[in-house]
Structure formats: C-alpha cells, structure tokens
Image (cartoon, grey):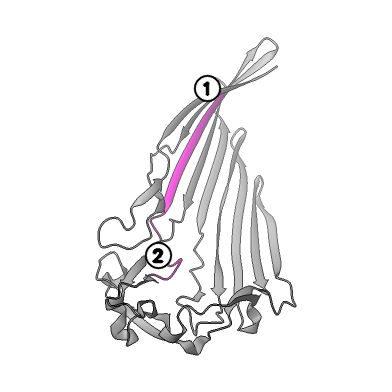
Amino acid sequence: MLRGFGKRQYNWQTAVSVQHELWSGTAVNVGFFRGSFGNFIATDNTLVGPEQYDSYCITAPVDARLPGGGGYRVCDLFDIKPAQFGRINNEVTQSLHFGDQRQVFTGIDAVFTSRFGRGGVLTGGMSTGHTVLECVSPDLPTLQFCTNEPPFTQTLQFKVAANYPLPWWGIHAAANLQNLKGIPIAASYVATNAQIAPSLGRDLAACRGAAVCNATAVVQLLEPNILFEDRLTQLDIRFTKIFQLARARLRGMFDVYNLFNANDALVMSTRYTPDNRWLRPSSVLGARLFKVSGEIDF
C-alpha cells in the first residue's frame, strides 16, 4: 500500500574542474564532485512502533581476525516484543515522515597528461571519495550502523598508462598500471538465542510457544566500509607492430595481462565462522595471461 507521497525523489549534482598546463606538453585537470539525494521511500509496518521493540547486545567472538582480537560488545540490536510477533501491515511512504535520511557522495579526481621523448604519451591520476549514509526507520529506534561515514579514501585508486614507439623494428609499446583499494571486509554472524537472551532479558520473540528455542538472529560484527582487504595492483603491457602487405595492413599485437600474476581477492565469504571459511575468496584476479592477436585493414 502507498501513502503520504507528495514529493518525488531527487538528486542534486555538482561538479567543478580546473585544467592547467604545468609546462610545455604537460597538463593537469582537478575536479570536485558532489551528489546529494533526497525524498527517499520507507516501508512502515503500521501495526508496530519503536516502543514495541526491546534492545539487546551480544559479545563478538574472540578472534584475532576481528578488530582488537574480538570480544567487544555489539549493540543497537532489536527484537520485537513477543505479543507483537507476526503482526504485519506494511505501507510504503516517504522517509521524511520519520526523520532526515541522507545520502551524499563527495569525490575528487586529479588527472595529468604528458608528452615525452619522440612520440611518447603518459597519462594517469588518482580519484577518491566516499558516500555518507544516514538512514531512518519507522519501526526501530536506532538501526545498527544506521549512520555510515566511511573514510574519504574509501575508493582511492591510482592509474597510469604509457605509450611509446620503440626505436627498434617499428614496435610500439604500451603499459597500463592500476592500484586499487581492496574490497571491503564484512562479517555477518549468526547469534543464538542463548547468546542473546541474557542481554535481552527474555527469549527471542520467534521462540514464542516453543518448548526448546532454536531461533537465531543475524548480526553484523563490523561497520560497513571501514576495513578493507590489501590493495590490488595490476600491470598490463602490449607490444604492437604494423606490417605492410601489398594493399593491406596487418597490425600484430602481443599482450600480457596481470604481468606480476597478482591473485588479490575480488569476492570473498562474508558469513563469519570461527574456521577458515570466513574471508575465503570465491573469486580472485585472473592469472597472468598471454595473448597474440592481429587486425587486417584492406
């Protein structure tokens, strides 16, 4: 059901950039970007309110892979009162009826271009930024990690590309180097009723009427976008030579992708377990690859 819609969702985009020639053949461009979003929508269960939830905390497992070795308190967790369990009548409305929800992106780019030697071109730069989130919930007093303000270096990356005609045999060389921030680390933890009940002061509402309570709750042990894997570095190179064949032209290419054979994780398990399944990669950077190809123009 929809109710209370009077304003459309919107976003304001601001971009400012400055370009300047540092010296002959070398120029730099610096840009600032900001995007602000508003008039979000929210789902409101009209049969319950914030006062019908009880808060609780759990203790994170002791694990050297967690901040400070684990064992810290994780709070801002809620469970509905047993008498209200299962009562649902959801309506979709605008979040401004419940508070000020924010989503703001701020970013900076700096790019340079330079010509050198006899026909060489070098380009590259850096970019960084972050997205600040502040949510509202019509049904819960305070959601866990409802406000998330990751470091400004959340997306910090560096890229450099070079092209140069080698003085031997008409070969043209190119290289592309990139250094990217590692993927964020997350840890969702399945907490049992036995771990929750001492702080909650009762069993989970899902246990109502059960002789033995086997209910659980999924808890995030880490704030999003705060911890990251090691940075990813990849170097690709290409050699090109053009052969003239009568009226046709053959462009031969030899490529090497991931020259240093880096194996950084691209996707990993986010469900916390005390064994090695947590943070186990399910996708890694592709292995070193050699490729020979050609193009004919006629």
Q: Quadrant of residue 138?
A: bottom right
Query: Residue 68, image x and y in percent?
Result: 29, 72
Q: Is residue 183 above or below residue 194?
A: above
Q: Is residue 14 visible?
A: yes
Label 1 to label 2: alpha-carbon separation: 47 Å
Which callout, 1 or 2, points to the residue nearer the camera? Answer: 2
Query: Residue 147, image x and y in percent?
Result: 51, 76
Which residue is drawn at the image coordinates 65% and 67% (left, top)?
Answer: 34
Query: Could you classify mark 1 by the number of other residues whose Cα lies within 10 Å: few (under 14), some (14-19), or many (20 or more)?
Result: few
Question: Quick check: is 236 in the magenta stretch?
Answer: yes
Query: Residue 118, image x and y in percent?
Result: 61, 32
**Span shown in magenta:** 222-241
Q: As rendered, which of 181 and 194 lies closer to the eye? A: 194
Specify the quadrant that holds the C terminus: top right
For mark 1, give the secondary structure.
loop
Query: Residue 234, image x and y in percent?
Result: 45, 44
Which residue is drawn at the image coordinates 66% and 44% (left, top)?
Answer: 25
- Residue denoted by label 2: 227
Q: Amino acid at mark 2?
A: Leu
Q: How many marks?
A: 2
Per the rendering, the mark at residue 168 is 1
Which residue is drawn at the image coordinates 69% and 56% (left, top)?
Answer: 19
Q: Is residue 271 above or below residue 3?
A: above
